[in-house]
């Protein structure tokens, strides 16, 4: 019995089977995405809240002006994982990202764990961003257009707000958060080509906003704000000095979360063996340059110590220029950034559940493809309801760290998958090969694990509770319905 259970948990899906499933059957996704569409998806997922908030926090509390070094260090860790993602995405051009790679290398149980874990990165992440999107849209309508939305309709039932007479009241629903989730989900259901076009347009808008802020702000940078570039450590680990730079890297790493969502669209990419590598590494490189440039200008406009506890450090920095209209432009850029993050995260989530449903680790409901749109519309519909409920009715700000810990775990497993497949499938086609294997994957594993360890105990507890729920579902339903398991039993 023990041997049978162990065999079930470690059974893998061959590369040949993965690729055959992707190209056959009625539930086949349409391949319409070129390299620039994939790069835009990566940028759309990455550039969001991190650019406009984490930069100031990391500078004020940890690294000072040397936060630019923190961004560079975090990008190196992401690059290790990105190279591993690129190799596997080219070898296995199938929807599902880290879930699919784990199924091919480490077995069904690990694949289930990472698939279930990715809900934290994509669905919970999209819900969290939708709440922030709502607050910025509310502020933009009020400050720029003079439109005041009813407070009860922009706060969840568990949140309070202050009335004109000083009393407090509970909200009813965060309606804008629900509306953006519904809009993004509807766009994804209509078609991946249409979604990619909208994403590309919005990405251009927010990149233009960032370029204007950097270009204008550069002329008002004060050299004295860079002194000292690396503030002296206070005697506490993580408060300035090189330990502060490393702690800052752990903080700003979360600004890079999302570039891996490109790999979830591998089954919808034209020439994935070539284009997936371009999409993953190209978007990561562009975002790194943008982050470093933005951080350099931000800390040059405002002394890092003045951004301590500042929820909107970019607005504080813009106030140092004689152009008040830039504040509205930045707010517009934030809204655009959040919009594409939500779109791409929901795209990633629906494709992961599509793949898990194809393998019958989840009900077949999630893998049904619309006959006209050629998208997993039922999966999109399910997460539209689930994610909008989170965003509209729950104060989910505390779940933000769960997005990061889920991502780091996925990165570690992808890096391990490259090492395993180099041993088990040495002759397999690899249009892109991760350099210096196993050194690069090992460095990726170690750097991601170091960042996971830096997270607080409550985040680890939430992860363990979430994984425990996943084990209940796997052993209660998924293991018995597994497509590979049933075929092996029949044979």
Image (spheres, rainbow, N blue to C red):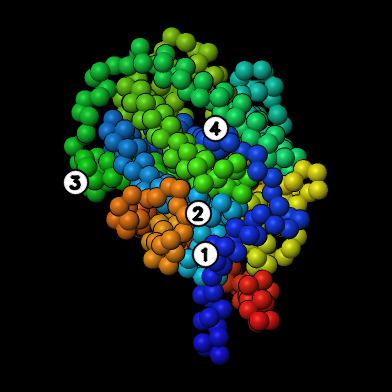
Instruction: Find the distance from the CA under tag 4 to the CA under tag 3.
Output: 47 Å
Position of residue 184 in the picture relative to residue 457 (left or right): right
Please state which of the two labelled residues, at mark 1 or mark 3, is closer to the viewer.
1
Q: Contact, CB < 8 Å: mark 1 with mark 3?
A: no
Task: Determine the secondary structure under disc 3.
Answer: loop
The residue depicted at 75 percent of the width and 52 percent of the height is 369
Q: Secondary structure at mark 2?
A: helix
Q: Is residue 81 visible?
A: no
Give the vertical position of 291 relative to 379 (above or below). Answer: above
Q: Looking at the rendering, in which quadrant would you find the C terminus? A: bottom right
Judged from this view, the residue extending furthest toward the top is 322
Q: CA distance from mark 2 to mark 1?
A: 11 Å
Q: Give how far apart the Cα atoms at labels 3 and 2 are.
A: 48 Å
Give the spatial CA distance, label 1 vs label 4: 28 Å
Residue at which label 4 appears? 36
What residue is disc 3 on? 235
Residue at figure coordinates x 53%, y 13% from the top left: 325
Of callouts 1 and 4, the N-terminal one: 4
According to the image, label 1 marks what residue? 104
Which mark lies nearer to you, 4 or 3? 4
Disc 4 packing (10 Å; few <14; some 14–19; many ≥20): some
Left or right, 21 with reference to 240 = right
- Label 2 vs 1, first from the N-terminus: 2
Q: Earlier in the sequence, mark 3 or mark 2?
A: 2
Q: Nearer the viewer, residue 169 or 372?
A: 372
Image vertical order of residue 386 relative to residue 103, above or below: above
Please provide percent x and percent y for residue 83.
40, 47
Residue 58 image position (x, y, % from top left):
35, 38
User: Residue 271 or 207: which is nearer the viewer?
Assistant: 271
Q: Residues within 10 Å of mark 1 (few under 14, many from 20)?
A: many
Residue at numbered disc 2: 91
């Amino acid at each position: 019995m023990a041997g049978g259970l162990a065999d079930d948990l470690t059974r893998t899906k061959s590369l040949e089977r993965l690729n055959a499933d992707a190209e056959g059957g009625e539930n086949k996704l349409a391949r319409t995405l070129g390299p620039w569409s994939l790069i835009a998806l990566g940028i759309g997922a990455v550039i969001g809240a991190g650019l406009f908030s984490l930069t100031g926090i990391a500078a004020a509390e940890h690294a000072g002006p040397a936060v630019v070094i923190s961004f560079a260090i975090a990008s190196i860790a992401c690059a290790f994982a990105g190279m591993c993602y690129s190799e596997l995405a080219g070898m296995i051009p199938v929807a599902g990202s880290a879930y699919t790679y784990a199924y091919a290398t480490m077995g069904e149980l690990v694949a289930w764990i990472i698939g279930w874990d990715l809900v934290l990165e994509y669905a919970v992440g999209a819900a969290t961003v939708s709440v922030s999107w709502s607050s910025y849209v509310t502020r933009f309508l009020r400050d720029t257009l003079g439109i005041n939305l009813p407070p009860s309709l922009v706060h969840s039932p568990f949140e309070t707000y202050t009335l004109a007479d000083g009393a407090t009241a509970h909200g009813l629903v965060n309606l804008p958060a629900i509306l953006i989730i519904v809009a993004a989900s509807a766009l994804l259901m209509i078609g991946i080509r249409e979604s990619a076009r909208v994403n590309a347009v919005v990405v251009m808008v927010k990149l233009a906003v960032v370029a204007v802020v950097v270009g204008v702000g550069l002329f008002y940078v004060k050299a004295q704000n860079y002194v000292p570039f690396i503030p002296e450590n206070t005697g506490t680990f993580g408060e300035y000095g090189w330990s502060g730079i490393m702690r800052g890297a752990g903080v700003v790493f979360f600004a890079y979360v999302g570039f891996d969502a490109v790999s979830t669209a591998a089954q919808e990419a034209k020439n994935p063996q070539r284009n997936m590598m371009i999409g993953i590494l190209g978007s990561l490189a562009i975002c790194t340059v943008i982050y470093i440039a933005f951080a350099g200008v931000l800390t040059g406009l405002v002394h890092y110590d003045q951004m301590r506890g500042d929820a909107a450090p970019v607005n504080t920095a813009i106030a140092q220029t004689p152009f008040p209209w830039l504040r509205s432009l930045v707010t517009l850029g934030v809204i655009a950034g959040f919009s594409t993050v939500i779109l791409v995260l929901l795209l990633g989530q629906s494709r992961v559940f599509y793949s898990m449903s194809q393998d019958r680790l989840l009900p077949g409901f999630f893998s049904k493809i619309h006959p006209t749109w050629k998208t997993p519309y039922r999966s999109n519909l399910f997460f539209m309801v689930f994610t909008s409920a989170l965003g509209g009715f729950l104060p989910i700000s505390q779940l933000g760290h769960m997005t990061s810990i889920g991502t780091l775990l996925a990165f570690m497993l992808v890096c391990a998958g490259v090492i395993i497949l180099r041993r088990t499938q040495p002759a397999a086609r690899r249009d892109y090969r991760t350099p210096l294997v196993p050194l690069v994957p090992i460095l990726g594993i170690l750097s991601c694990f170091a960042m996971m360890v830096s997270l607080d105990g409550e985040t680890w507890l939430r992860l363990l509770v979430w994984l425990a729920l996943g084990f209940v579902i796997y052993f209660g339903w998924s293991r018995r319905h597994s497509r590979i398991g049933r075929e092996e039993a029949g044979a």
